[in-house]
């Protein structure tokens, strides 16, 4: 079997595949997966593919000449190296490149089909709990109480960030992309959802109060809703990674088990479904499904999502200091 490492640039093929994503976050995820796969192959074959940013690892794999035996070998390298979810993401990225090669006429259909068969995803376990730490109402209340006992604008931002993650079931990349102008009263437009889709989510109760308190101290003017603090600058947009780090920090500080922003999303969806809310309304609220043209005019879907959101009770604690 020929070596998987090929020193002919594969950048054009990879970039063509990555350009099919309308979501920058999805493109970044697949780009990182392809680099991880290339590094694993290089490590297995005892080859150094370098760290030159102008010639990244993903451009050093001979994607076009990938065949069934090589694909089986590649999959075997990934299994056991990462969690099943991560392996499946990496395999999906490679299948995407293979599909692009086929559509571009660079790989024969029969070989592309065989490679796709070899790169099948790992089966999902049908038993056991959902992966990821458990977010609890008590844990959230402890975090909000800890935040409320601290003076400073950064803590008002933290409360708003945590409230938005739990009330709106947003992904961290979606929240990082939210601008002030996307918020109108209790309605928030998520303009940069997965797959480039937009949706409308709703705030009420503690979550709405948390965001309103943050808006009182946030600097005036348009721009990102959530901003960074430090080095004398409070106008830079928080990143998805920054949100992830901050949520972990807030959990540690409040003395509750650490969790990630996506666990807030799981918590919100589980709470809604457990309360007997319509699964279609919950799907729309979470942005899990495509929205066709008709649904843009169907107010029933929007109103159902609005009603569903009222069943989320965010244990926000108002700041202990008085407001001017």
Image (cartoon, grey):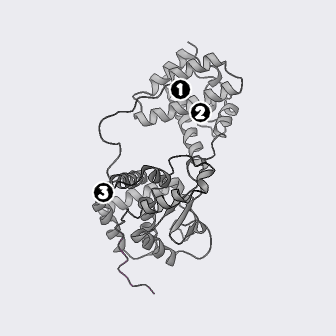
Choose between 323 and 153: the one closer to the eye: 323
Q: Using residue 324 as the reference point, say whether residue 142 is left or right of it.
A: left
The residue at the far bottom in this view is 324
Query: Eyeballing the image, is 208 above or below 237?
Result: below
Q: Main secondary structure of the magenta part?
A: loop
Label 1: how many Cα within 10 Å (few below 14, some 14–19, many 20+) = many
- At a point 65% along the width and 39% down the height, the residue shown is 20
In the figure, residue 167 lies in which quadrant?
bottom left
Which secondary structure, mark 1? helix
Task: Give the mark nearest the N terminus, 1 or 3.
Answer: 1
**Which residue range is magenta in the image?**
316-324
In the figure, residue 100 lies in which quadrant?
top right
Cα gap from disc 1 to disc 3, whole angstroms: 43 Å
Task: Give the mark nearest the N terminus, 2 or 1.
Answer: 1
Cα gap from disc 2 to disc 1, whole angstroms: 9 Å
Query: Eyeballing the image, is 211 above or below 25?
Result: below
Q: Using residue 4 as the reference point, say whether residue 130 is left or right of it.
A: left
**Tags 2 and 1 touching, CB below 8 Å:** yes
Q: Which residue matches tag 1?
A: 42
Choose between 132 and 256: the one closer to the eye: 132
In the figure, residue 50 lies in which quadrant?
top right
Task: Give the mark nearest the N terminus, 2 or 3.
Answer: 2
Q: Is residue 318 magenta?
A: yes
Cα gap from disc 2 to disc 3, whole angstroms: 41 Å
Q: Which residue matches tag 3?
A: 136
Q: Determine if residue 175 is in view.
A: no
Q: Which residue matches tag 2?
A: 57
- At a point 43% along the width and 69% down the height, the residue shown is 204
Label 2: how many Cα within 10 Å (few below 14, some 14–19, many 20+) = many
Q: Determine if residue 317 is in view.
A: yes
Residue 7 coordinates in the image, percent (x, y) = 65, 24
Q: How many marks?
A: 3
């Amino acid at each position: 079997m020929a070596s998987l490492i090929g020193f002919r640039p594969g950048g054009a093929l990879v970039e063509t595949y990555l350009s099919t994503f309308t979501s920058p976050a999805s493109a970044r995820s697949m780009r990182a997966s392809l680099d991880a796969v290339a590094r694993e192959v290089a490590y297995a074959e005892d080859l150094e593919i370098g760290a030159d940013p102008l010639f990244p690892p993903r451009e050093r794999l001979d994607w076009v000449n990938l065949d069934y035996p090589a694909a089986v070998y590649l999959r075997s390298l990934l299994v056991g190296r990462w969690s099943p979810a991560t392996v499946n993401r990496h395999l999906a990225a490679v299948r995407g490149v293979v599909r692009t090669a086929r559509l571009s006429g660079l790989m024969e259909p029969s070989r592309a089909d065989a490679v796709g068969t070899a790169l099948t995803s790992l089966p999902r376990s049908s038993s056991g709990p959902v992966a990821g730490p458990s977010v609890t109402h008590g844990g959230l209340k402890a975090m909000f109480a800890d935040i409320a006992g601290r003076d400073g604008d950064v803590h008002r931002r933290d409360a708003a960030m945590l409230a938005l993650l739990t009330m709106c079931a947003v992904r961290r990349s979606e929240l990082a992309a939210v601008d002030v102008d996307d918020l109108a009263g209790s309605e928030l437009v998520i303009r940069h959802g997965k797959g480039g889709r937009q949706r409308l989510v709703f705030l009420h109760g503690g979550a709405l109060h948390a965001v309103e308190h943050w808006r009182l101290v946030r600097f005036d003017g348009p721009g990102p809703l959530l901003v960074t603090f430090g080095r004398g600058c409070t106008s830079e947009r928080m990143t998805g990674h920054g949100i992830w780090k901050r949520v972990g920090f807030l959990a540690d500080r409040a003395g509750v088990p650490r969790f990630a922003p996506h666990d807030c999303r799981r918590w919100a969806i589980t709470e809604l479904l457990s309360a007997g809310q319509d699964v279609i309304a919950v799907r729309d609220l979470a942005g899990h499904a495509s929205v066709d043209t008709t649904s843009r005019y169907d107010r029933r879907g929007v109103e159902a999502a609005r009603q569903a959101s009222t069943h989320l009770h965010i244990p926000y604690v108002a700041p202990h200091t008085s407001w001017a």
